[in-house]
Image (spheres, rainbow, N blue to C red):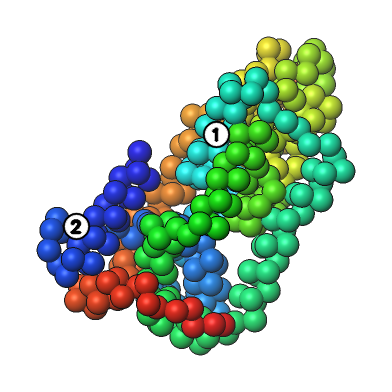
Amino acid sequence: MGDLNIQVRYLLWVRFCERGGTGLSVPRPAGAEGWLPIAGLMNTKYFFLTGRVPAIHPAAMVLFIAFMLMSLLLKKAFCSWLCPVGTFSEQVWKLGRRVFGRNLHPPKWVDIPLQGLKYLLLGFFVFLIVAMSAEAIHDFMSTPYGLVADVKMLNFFRDIGETAAIVIGLLVLLSMLIQNFWCRYLCPYGALLGITSLLGPVKIRRDVEACIDCGKCARACPSSLAVDQLVQIRSVECTACMACVAACPAENALQFSLVPRKAATPAERWRRRALSPIAVAAVLACIFLGLVVVAKATGHWQTNLPRDVYMDLVSHAREAGHPGI
Ligand code: SF4
Ligand code: SF4
């Protein structure tokens, strides 16, 4: 809901600027910069190189760091708990299951090479950004294109061409057939979060003594992970959705937990180290709100351009060409 609210306010702000300051006036919601993960990555690099918070799209950096932190602590929880594309994707495959009666599971020889595509895309972006100096990042962000990169993104969908519409239609159809098609095969952001999540301490863990080998967890897993065969899920594809935990009928057999302590009794071990869905939601909210509140309080949330400059840039955003890197 919060995300939808931001999108509506953002659209109103763009329309206000395009109409030269007439109509409903709303402040620019900087949270829309969550749609600029590449700017977030570039700005994070700038921050680590210079020690200074970038003046252009600081919210993109704050949100990027928040989502990375979430992945570091709670697997790819961002994908299943917060990402609007992930949420849309989930609704689409559920719809596909209702329409076609089932979802398809590509065989391993198709599935594994396809999973590599998102790492290729990630490698491409990382390669470009690694080559940029702090000065080059600053110069890029200061161009008209960089300043209104968020509006360019919006205009891509508003002025969508035939080819792009066909590609998006095809992706939606494939997402109806295959669970989380975009996330599993193509999303470079998810690829980065997945790699980061390998370092995390909290994982889905199965107690083989309590498990009754019913296989319900594996059947419930939207990432097609063999939860019923493993003792812990290290996979980069685990999104901490906890569907497997919810499906498990055996008490304390499956938990999203830290490594259990050896000293306590088995049941106590799991209870003390396991995270409930409420605890996961609370940790995600603390990271998200904590960083946003600090950024706002220290003046590192909004891109502070004068209103008339924004109005000029936004109304000419369609003419702003990519400056190259
Ligand atoms: S169902 Fe379990 S193993 Fe599968 S993605 Fe969700 S949390 Fe991870
Ligand atoms: S759902 Fe629970 S009991 Fe069944 S196989 Fe998975 S972990 Fe074991």
**Toward the viewer: 35 or 193?**
35
**Toward the viewer: 112 or 102?**
102
> Mark 1 = which residue?
92
Image quarter of residue 215: top right
Marks 1 and 2 sit apart, C-alpha to C-alpha, by 32 Å
Identified at 51% across, 52% down, the residue is 165
Find residue 198 and name its label. none
Q: Position of residue 84 (x, y in %)?
A: 47, 44
> Given the image, on which type of amino acid does mark 2 rest?
Val
Identified at 78% across, 36% down, the residue is 106
> Mark 2 = which residue?
26
Could you tell me which secondary element the residue under label 2 belongs to?
loop
In this rendering, does residue 44 appear at all? no
> Given the image, on which type of amino acid does mark 1 rest?
Val
Q: Position of residue 50 (x, y in %)?
A: 51, 81
Vertical side of 275 occupied by 307: above or below: below
Quadrant position of the N terminus in the picture: top left
Q: Is residue 302 left or right of residue 306?
A: right
